[in-house]
Image: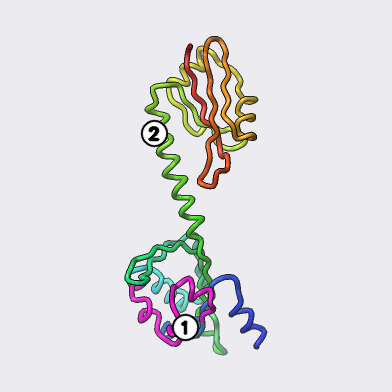
């Protein structure tokens, strides 16, 4: 038993056990207390007592559903709102609720496992906003412009000016795209009195994720 308790306490993910009748916090490892921004003093207290803000969120009802049905529940990238030092905080979590059965096969406790994935989800939201802004920029640009995404250079967005330029002077630009993408440097080329410029597109960590291509007649 001590071996399992040690595994629980030292697990790299947040873990807690709630009583099925009262949602009393019977156990919580340091990772869970850190995730909830709470001290050990919350042990033995009911969930809505030390997290009253959770009453307005779907999680208590989801826990009761697990208790009623005996079926586990999990979610990826869920938003969790909490109050810390008087300020509202938003945390993104991957979590699961797993029923623990007693001798009579009734649910007596719920094992809660969670991982803080705020950095991952915020980065995802950042990319979505950046993609929308970039598409808007491309579509309204006064010059021919296209955005290629990934190492296979799928067209993410392209404006009518670039389509018109390609119809009149179609050429393969894979070599240029590969050079810019793999070396992370800008590049210019000229063909039939049309100048093409290629600029690496980077994410918030500085990694090249695509290439922006601009064409203009000389």
Q: Please tell me which residue lies in front, 189 or 178.
A: 189
Q: Badge 2, how many Cα within 10 Å: few under 14, some, many 20+?
A: few
N-terminal of the pair, mark 2 or mark 1, is 1
For the residues labelled 2 and 1, say whether their Cβ atoms are less than 8 Å apart: no
Q: Please tell me which residue lies in front, 134 or 166.
A: 134
- Mark 2, mark 1: which one is toward the viewer? 1
Q: State the colouring used for the structure image.
A: rainbow
At mark 1, the secondary structure is helix
| Residue in view at x 52 percent, y 26 percent | 213
Percent of width and height locating residue 106? 51, 85
User: In this rendering, is residue 170 above or below 99?
Assistant: above
Tell me if residue 32 is in the magenta stretch: yes
| Residue in view at x 35 percent, y 72 percent | 85
Magenta region, main secondary structure: helix
Q: Which residue is mark 2?
A: 136
Residue 40, numbered label = 1
Percent of width and height locating residue 22? 41, 85
């Amino acid at each position: 038993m001590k071996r399992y308790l040690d595994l629980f306490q030292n697990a790299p993910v947040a873990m807690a056990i709630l009583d099925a009748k009262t949602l009393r916090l019977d156990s919580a490892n340091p990772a869970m207390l850190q995730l909830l921004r709470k001290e050990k003093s919350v042990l033995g207290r009911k969930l809505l007592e030390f997290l009253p803000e959770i009453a307005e969120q779907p999680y208590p009802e989801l826990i009761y559903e697990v208790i009623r049905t005996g079926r586990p529940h999990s979610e990826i990238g869920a938003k969790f709102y909490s109050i810390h030092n008087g300020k509202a905080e938003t945390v993104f979590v991957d979590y699961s609720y797993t029923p623990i059965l007693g001798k009579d096969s009734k649910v007596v406790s719920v094992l809660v496992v969670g991982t803080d994935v705020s950095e991952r989800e915020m980065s995802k939201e950042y990319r979505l906003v950046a993609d929308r802004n970039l598409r808007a920029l491309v579509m309204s640009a006064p010059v021919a412009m296209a955005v290629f995404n990934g190492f296979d250079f799928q067209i993410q967005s392209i404006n009518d000016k670039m389509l018109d330029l390609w119809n009149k002077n179609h050429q393969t630009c894979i070599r240029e795209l590969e050079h810019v993408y793999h070396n992370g440097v800008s590049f210019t080329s000229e063909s039939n009195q049309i100048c093409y410029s290629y600029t690496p597109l980077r994410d918030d960590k500085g990694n090249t994720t695509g290439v922006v291509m601009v064409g203009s007649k000389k």
